[in-house]
Image (tube, coloured by chain):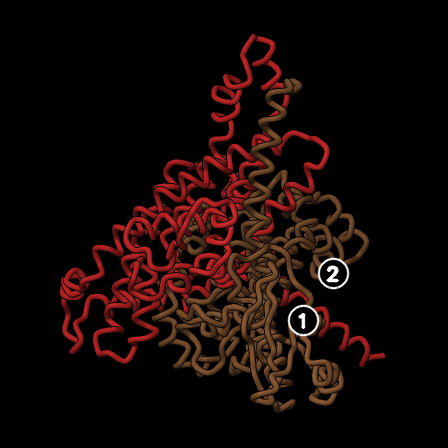
Chain colours: A red, B brown
Amino acid sequence: MQDIKSKKTIKEQLKHGMQTIINRKTAPFWLLFPTFLYYIVFWLSPILISIKEVFTSLDGQFTLFGNFIMIFQENTFHDAILNTALFAVVSVLLQFIIALMLALMLSRKFKGQKLILFLIMIPMAITPTAVAIVWKTGLISSGWINSILQSFHLIDEVIPFIGLRGIDAVMMIILIDTWTVMPSVMIILIAGLGNIPEETKEAGFIFGANRWQVIKDIVIPLLKPSIITAVILRMIAAVQVWAIVVMVMGFSNVPFLVERIAYFVGPVSGLPYAQKLAYTYSFITAIIVFIATLIYFKISKRGTALDGGTQK
Amino acid sequence: MKRLNPIQRVLLGLILTTAIIAVVLPLMFFLANAFSNSTEIYDYPKTPLMSFTVTVDVSYDQVTEEYVIKYVDRRGDVKNAINSSSMLLISNYFEQYFSVYRTPEELESQFEEVLTSGETIRLTYAKNLWHNFKTFFFITSKADEALINSIVVVIYTIIISLTLGSMSGYAIARYRFKGKDQINVFLLIVRMFPTVGISIPLAVILIRYNLFDTMLGLAILYSLPNIALTAWITSSIFVGINRELEEASLVFGGNGFQTFMKITLPLALPAMAASSMYAFLTAWNDTISALILTNDHPTLALAVYQAIGDNTTNLQYAAAGSIILIIPALIFTFVVRKYVNQMWGSVSV
């Protein structure tokens, strides 16, 4: 009897002890603590290492601009920046226009709408590496793109797509990228369209607006949060394009920022300055993306699809 | 909603048809390529339909005493393939260039007719459709290991992201505390931050903990954006879950943990499914971080990337490898999408 009682009190004491450690005040701390620890070890400290590497020279001396000067002198840097900027702007614009058009069409119910949506969404689920191969089998001189053009008698000689360089090559990669990521933009827009009450549109029609006016003056303004979300998310991903570029065109032929990182950690990683250049390139990429994030955060302080749920 | 007039309908149909062709046609050609044998891959112009058979013309050259095998492409053009008197050589050639598996004896009995008559006969063989897949695993060193690695890294990533992410999401949704807004901002920044930027310095840390070139190390990286994403997705769901249900459970004597496991978690299942989809896609699709953080243990995406390099020949094997890469991602995306659809109203990415 005594024994059981003491056991019970120990149990109760334990429970009481637990309750003083874990209660409504401290619970969020305990729930968030593992995540914070994780981010300090695996996110913050890599960033600190990266900052240290970017601001020290090869022999370990502090240098403010040394590595940036080195990267400026690296002969593919300008092309990498220009190509990435061109790619980010044109691809996002193109994807947005196509996605908005399709989203407006597919957000209304009709027969076969679900099937069409499913088909159009397939490329989104395809791994970038595989996308590169899908298109590479088309772009080689005996590939399917030349085959199509030939069978419609649009060309007499094969076009060497793989050999394209400069702006032509960037445009080609934009088309490939659009094929695979346009659906993800479309989905954000369709979800946004779903949240627009039907009555607002009907009100527009009642007041005599035509379809185009309703879209321009009612739907698009209401869709703005989704549009901002989609565009910025795409922008951020577009800055980081590389796999398709390398697999279709090869290294160094059409330089991009992240393609350069892959180049310096991949084929030439043995060279002494390669590591430094990789650090500096990834630092610059991270800064660009970070700025884009901040701009996004400024524009859409409230009510976008991205921070919607948590900021009530 | 206003009804469309006939012209608008036609226009709508045209645009949608174009979109579907633009999606489906590349995929059809890609499939045809992935199942091409080493001879068909050089056919030009190509057709978007897969071929299941190979047609050859067989004759016998009395002077050289050799069988003359000619390949008949799908448009009916005849091309030289192999001249040989050795059945073994021909059998090997059939396997390597036509993906046709026939023993020398089988071929010999089929060719016998040509010996006596001296005429050309046309034979059609069924292709072995697995040939390119076998060859992909054969020529890509570690491809089988890479497939297992990919599965392992996906599982790790999902486990890490879901546990840490949903705990944080719950805390953000259910408790009031100082600094909540700052935490939200921080999670957004972490999510947007390019993983490439983290990968290179993270290698230093992973080496320190002996995690470099391991799947756990890779999963740690993939979880960085996904913990934040999961926290955000789940918190918006937890906010929506009726708190009275949880209180009822507590009244009936369940403790906090039981309540969470039996009431809250099942209700948050769609959010979990969505989060695990994103975790899956991050881990399964990435190549750049795998390139940086592994040495001898590639993931499948990396193995396919390395198999193709900047080659333009033998693309059919890389294409077969890609199919292995695509199918799980496709299935996972569309199975989970059902759950994701349930929460489209509140969350949309």
Image side of residue B333 versus residue A81, left or right: right
Can residue B159 be seen from the camera position used here? no
Indicate whether A216 appears above or below A135. Answer: above
Picture residue at 78% right of the left edge, 48% below the top: B248
- Chain letter for the residue marked with disc 1 in the picture: B
Looking at the rendered structure, the kind of residue marked 1 is Leu
Q: Residue furthest right?
A: A1
Report the front residue among A157 and A131.
Answer: A157
The answer to which of A122 and A219 lies nearer the viewer is A122
Disc sitting over residue B258 in the figure:
2
**Mark 1 sits on what residue?**
B129
Quadrant of residue A209 within the rendered picture:
top right
The chain letter for the residue carrying disc 2 is B
Q: Judging from the image, what secondary structure is the residue with disc 1 in?
A: loop
Q: Earlier in the sequence, mark 2 or mark 1?
A: 1
Looking at the image, is B329 positioned above or below residue B249?
below
Left-right relation of B235 to A303? right
Write the residue at 38% across / 36% down.
Answer: A299
